[in-house]
């Protein structure tokens, strides 16, 4: 009997090999889909930005962004040439029986295969030798995050959901962490986030989504900033205090006048998303992870039977 | 757009760009040379000289998605533009030693490139970053490639048609739109901080 047929506690049959093949296929497809079609909420936010833009050059640039999105869909081409560093955020249903080591291996294989089959630009290099792996996978790549979630109407508790975030380097290079102290107060938090937007200026391809991690430890804080980038546009934190902070910073950031591609204008950010964690009495870490206007993401829901449903 | 200038590269007149002013929009026909971090590290830090002439050239900061054909030529897949500031230190060498005159990129060169642009009559042209699908349609062919061992960061010769629109973001008169925007943003940041 193959080892993968051993039943877990509860008597449910362990997943067959086919489901890991489905995960591999889903991971590759997720990556390609993210690169080629922007989510509807991002397109809507860019349209709103175009309608509100006061600067003539800014309007020209927002028109080019809209035209580019349409051309990518028409030609089934990549929205942006930077195929990014691949980041996966996994939602694992609390009753999911999949072996996460095999899931992780399948995701790596899926990304490598998609990269080679589609001639996607290979970006993963050794940090010292700069030797390229040519597969967009490598040591600790793709970046993997795992989160365990209860079942919902959208996602059964025995399922797995892959969220793929191909993170372009122009915006990822604009990442910041500051270990604030209690005496800095919320004023210090607000100022630091806006300083990051000013410091980044034109480089992260504004208008950006400002992903903010607030609280936790330094590592958790930066991971939360990345998670904030993954959140669909148009929503808020479920904590009313944090949601109000998101609104205040969104309005403030758009007063900075940095504008589309940093050439001036009234649209500097498409959204400010804050994910928070409780933190130590002596600390208040803040991390900022910027996401360019081409805010690519896609998802795949995989059932234990290997059925895959794609989304954004 | 009717207020867009049209320019052909490589330039025949090395001083042709001196009259351009920050904020103007233009499109390019002819040739554009793709160049990137690793290409310039090879050219300037390791002294590896390309055969391709860069005299009067428009350079673009890119590492394209391409497919190598059996005959050794390359086919475009998706070509876009990367952040220029990382390659700022090569500006003088490109304009002085190689005679390039326009640098196309996103995010701008740093302020210390402005006097170099002034000295040689060069400009920095901003393209819409991330708009690679559209940019790819304006590139007709990949005509030549050097430094193939640096793939995808080679030296690429693209033939382009109506390439743009591009915005003169740094001109040969000492103006950088990025500096202007950043200075205003810093003032605004102080105003906002006072309100918090």
Image (spheres, grey):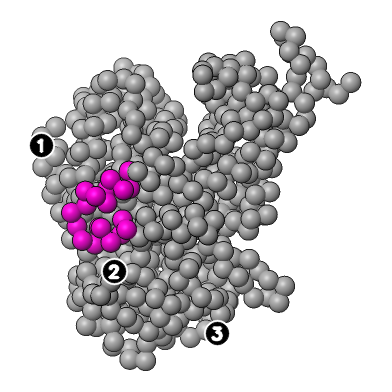
B184 sits left or right of A154 in the view: left
Which residue lies at the image location 63% right of the left edge and 29% below the top edge?
A302
Seen from this angle, which residue lies furthest front? Answer: A74
Mark 1 neighbour density, 10 Å: few (under 14) some (14–19) many (20 or more): few
Query: The numbered mark 1 sits on a residue in which chain?
Result: B
Q: Do callouts 3 and 1 point to residues on the same chain?
A: yes
Q: Does the rendering let one see residue A67?
A: yes
Residue assigned mark 2: B167
Place of residue A120 in the rendered image (x, y in percent of width and height, measured from the top left): 59, 56
Given residues A35 and B62, the one toward you in this image is A35
Query: The numbered mark 3 sits on a residue in which chain?
Result: B
Given residues A11 and A195, the one toward you in this image is A11
Place of residue A252 in the rendered image (x, y in percent of width and height, measured from the top left): 19, 39
Q: Quadrant of residue A160?
A: top right
Q: Along the polypeptide, which appears first: circle 3 or circle 1?
A: 3
Q: Quadrant of the N terminus of chain A?
A: top right
Question: How far is mark 3 from mark 1, CA to CA?
Answer: 57 Å
Q: Along the polypeptide, which appears first: circle 3 or circle 2?
A: 3
Q: Along the polypeptide, which appears first: circle 1 or circle 2?
A: 2
Q: Secondary structure at mark 3?
A: loop
Residue assigned mark 1: B194
Residue assigned mark 3: B51
Name the dominant secondary structure of the magenta segment. helix
Place of residue A203 in the rendered image (x, y in percent of width and height, measured from the top left): 34, 55
Q: Magenta region: which residues?
A: A45-63
B113 sits left or right of A71 in the view: left
Q: Nearer the viewer, mark 1 or mark 2?
A: 2
Which residue lies at the image location 67% right of the left edge and 30% below the top edge?
A307
Rendered position, A144 above or below B9: above
């Amino acid at each position: 009997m193959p080892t993968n047929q051993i039943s877990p506690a509860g008597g449910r049959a362990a997943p067959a090999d086919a489901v890991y093949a489905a995960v591999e296929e889903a991971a590759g497809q997720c990556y390609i889909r993210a690169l080629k079609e922007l989510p509807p909420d991002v397109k809507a936010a860019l349209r709103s930005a175009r309608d509100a833009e006061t600067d003539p050059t800014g309007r020209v640039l927002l028109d080019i962004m809209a035209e580019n999105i349409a051309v990518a869909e028409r030609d089934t081409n990549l929205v942006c040439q930077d195929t990014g560093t691949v980041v996966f955020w996994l939602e694992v249903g609390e009753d999911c029986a999949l072996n996460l080591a095999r899931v992780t291996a399948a995701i790596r294989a899926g990304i490598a295969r998609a990269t080679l089959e589609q001639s996607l630009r290979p970006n993963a290099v050794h940090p010292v030798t700069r030797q390229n792996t040519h597969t967009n996978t490598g040591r600790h790549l793709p970046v993997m995050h795992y989160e365990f979630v209860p079942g919902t109407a959208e996602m059964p508790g025995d399922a797995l959901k892959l969220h793929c975030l191909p993170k372009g380097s122009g915006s990822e290079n604009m990442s910041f962490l500051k270990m604030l102290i209690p005496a800095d107060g919320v004023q210090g938090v607000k100022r630091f986030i806006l300083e990051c937007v000013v410091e980044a200026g034109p480089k992260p391809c504004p208008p950006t989504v400002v992903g903010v991690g607030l609280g936790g430890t330094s590592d958790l804080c930066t991971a939360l900033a990345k998670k904030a980038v993954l959140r669909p546009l148009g929503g808020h934190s479920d904590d009313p205090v944090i949601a109000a902070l998101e609104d205040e910073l969104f309005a403030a950031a758009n007063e900075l006048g940095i504008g589309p591609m940093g050439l001036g204008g009234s649209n500097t950010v498409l959204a400010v998303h804050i994910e928070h964690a409780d933190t130590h009495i002596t600390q208040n870490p803040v991390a900022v992870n910027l996401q360019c206007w081409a805010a690519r993401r896609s998802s795949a829901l995989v059932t234990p039977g290997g059925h895959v449903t794609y989304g954004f | 757009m009717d207020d867009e200038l049209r320019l052909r590269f490589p330039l025949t007149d090395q001083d042709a760009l001196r009259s351009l002013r920050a904020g103007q929009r233009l499109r390019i026909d002819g040739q554009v040379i793709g160049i990137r971090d690793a290409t310039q590290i090879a050219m300037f830090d390791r002294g590896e000289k390309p055969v391709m002439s860069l005299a009067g050239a428009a350079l673009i900061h890119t590492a394209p998605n391409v497919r190598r054909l059996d005959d050794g030529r390359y086919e475009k897949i998706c070509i876009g533009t990367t952040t220029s500031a990382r390659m700022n230190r090569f500006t003088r060498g490109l304009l002085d030693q190689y005679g390039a005159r326009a640098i196309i990129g996103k995010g701008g060169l740093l302020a210390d490139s402005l006097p170099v642009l002034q000295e040689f009559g060069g400009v920095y042209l901003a393209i819409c970053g991330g708009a690679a699908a559209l940019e790819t349609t304006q590139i007709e062919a990949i005509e030549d490639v050097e430094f193939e061992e640096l793939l995808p960061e080679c030296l690429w010769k693209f033939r382009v048609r109506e390439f743009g629109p591009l915005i003169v973001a740094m001109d040969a008169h000492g103006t950088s739109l990025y500096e202007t925007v950043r200075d205003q943003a810093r003032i605004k940041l102080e105003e906002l901080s006072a309100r918090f």
